[in-house]
Amino acid sequence: MNILNTQHTKIHFNDRKDLKTFNRKCYVRRDIKNEIRKRKIDTIEDMAIAKVDVIFEKVMKVLDTYPFHNLDFNVTILPDDEDVSRKFMEIYGKKVDYIAFYSRRNKMVYFSARHAKLRVVAHEFGHVVAELWFSPTSPSRTVHEIIAQATEKLIYD
Ligand SMILES: [Zn+2]
């Protein structure tokens, strides 16, 4: 695994082509795009870092939790949904059909590069903020999901 340090997190990935796919699939709207343009982008890595940081900042803003500094989480970009489901099986021993998930246990968000969408990234980052904001307690599973779904909608406002 390769690791990129971003402002808010670390991005783990195996192959640069997964970052490239993530960048391409995770199409962002104008306000986020403008924010990304302000950063220095020379490489695929720069773009992945900028996307993750700017989307995470936007998530914190829409949830009114920005700035929030106690951020202990990582991101892993896997090639496909099969890899994401395999990872879930590895951690929880359950068969699922996921394109992304947040593991509280590993403090890690897993994405399928091929299924990366702004909506999906916002949803999982909503879970991260929900978890960290209420730390050391965790919100219930229902509250977690309500926050993540609200984040998905608010990111487009
Ligand atoms: Zn969720």
Image (cartoon, helix red, strand yellow):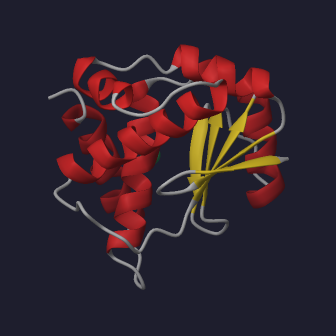
Quadrant including the C terminus: top left
Q: Which quadrant would residue 134 be assigned to in this image?
A: bottom left
x 68%, y 27%: residue: 19
Q: Where is residue 67 in the image (x, y as percent from the top left)?
A: 25, 63
Looking at the picture, does residue 119 appear above or below residue 30? below
Q: Left or right of 43: which side holds 93?
A: right
Give 18 or 122, whichever is nearer the viewer: 18
Percent position (x, y) of residue 88? 73, 48
- The x and y percentages for residue 25 are 54, 15
Report the residue at 41% width, 67% height from top. Answer: 131
Q: In this view, does 150 lie above or below 6?
A: above
Q: Which residue is drawn at 20% across and 53% down?
A: 63
Q: In this image, 117 relative to 155: left or right?
A: right
Q: Which image quarter: residue 71?
A: bottom left
The residue nearer to you, when weighing 39 against 129, is 39
**Can the viewer see residue 139?**
no
Q: Is residue 11 visible in the rendered structure shown here?
A: yes
Q: Nearer the viewer, residue 44 or 57?
A: 44
Marker count (numbered) = 0
Vertical placement of residue 131 versus 108, above or below: below
Where's residue 116, x and y in %? 55, 25
Q: Is residue 77 above or below residue 89?
A: above
- Residue at 38% of width from left, 46% of height from top? 56
In the displayed structure, does residue 64 sit left or right of residue 4? Answer: left
